[in-house]
Amino acid sequence: MTISLAPTDANATDPLSSVALNQALAENEAELAAVQAEMDRLRKIRSGLLRQTPVACERNNFGQGCGAVTSIGELTYIQTHWYEGPHGCSGGDTWHRGEGQFVCPSCGHRNRLYNRKDVEKLAGLFRVIQAVYDR
Ligand SMILES: [Zn+2]
């Protein structure tokens, strides 16, 4: 039994005429563009869902924090940095990225995210990222 391969079959090895090749490439390009558009649409939906990730204002031992829950898409992500002073001949004198934080819109308490890595990794989906450099 002989199976004939369509010109667009990925396993075909016979040479195509330049017209057939160009047509097959154009069809392939159109299919790739359609798949890309669908992936873009799904990624946009995914980002929208992730922006609704809830984050709680944690109550701490100092009586701070109110327990309010807010979507990360409504919050400013505060990216902290810490300074390493100069040492040795050429060491230090540089800034390092620290933990993420956010200010609770309900009570104004500045929450730390060092213990919430699942939220920290979504920094790009907060309303905005604010870089802070504290010595
Ligand atoms: Zn709060």
Image: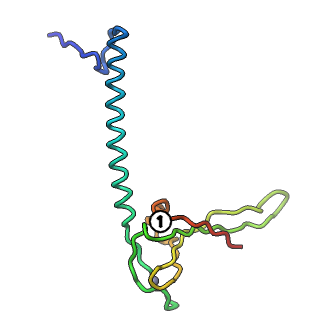
> Residue type at mark 1?
Arg
Question: In terms of image quarters, where does ligand 1 lie?
Answer: bottom left
Question: Considering only vertical position in the picture, is 60 above or below 51?
Answer: below
Q: Residue at x 37, y 52 (%)?
A: 44
Q: Residue at x 28, y 15 (%)?
A: 7
The image position of residue 87, as x and y in percent, is 81, 64
Q: Name the residue that disc number 1 marks.
A: 127
Question: Considering only vertical position in the picture, is 30 above or below 25?
Answer: below
Question: Considering only vertical position in the picture, is 34 above or below 44?
Answer: above
Task: Report the side of 122 relative to 35 (left or right).
Answer: right
Q: In front: 13, or 31?
A: 31
Q: In front: 96, or 6?
A: 6
Q: Residue at x 73, y 66 (%)?
A: 84
Q: Is mark 1 within 8 Å of ligand 1?
A: no
What SS does tag 1 mark? loop
Q: Quadrant of the C terminus?
A: bottom right
Q: Residue at x 43, y 64 (%)?
A: 118
The picture quadrant where one finds residue 49 is: bottom left
- Mark 1: few/some/many CA within 10 Å (<14, 14-19, 20+): some
The image position of residue 37, as x and y in percent, is 35, 41
Which residue, as the protein is rendered here, is positioned at the far bottom? 63
Question: Considering only vertical position in the picture, is 33 above or below 23?
Answer: below
Which residue, as the protein is rendered here, is positioned at the far right? 89
The picture quadrant where one finds residue 30 is: top left
The picture quadrant where one finds residue 79 is: bottom right
Task: Report the side of 130 relative to 118 (left or right).
Answer: right
The image position of residue 1, as x and y in percent, is 14, 10
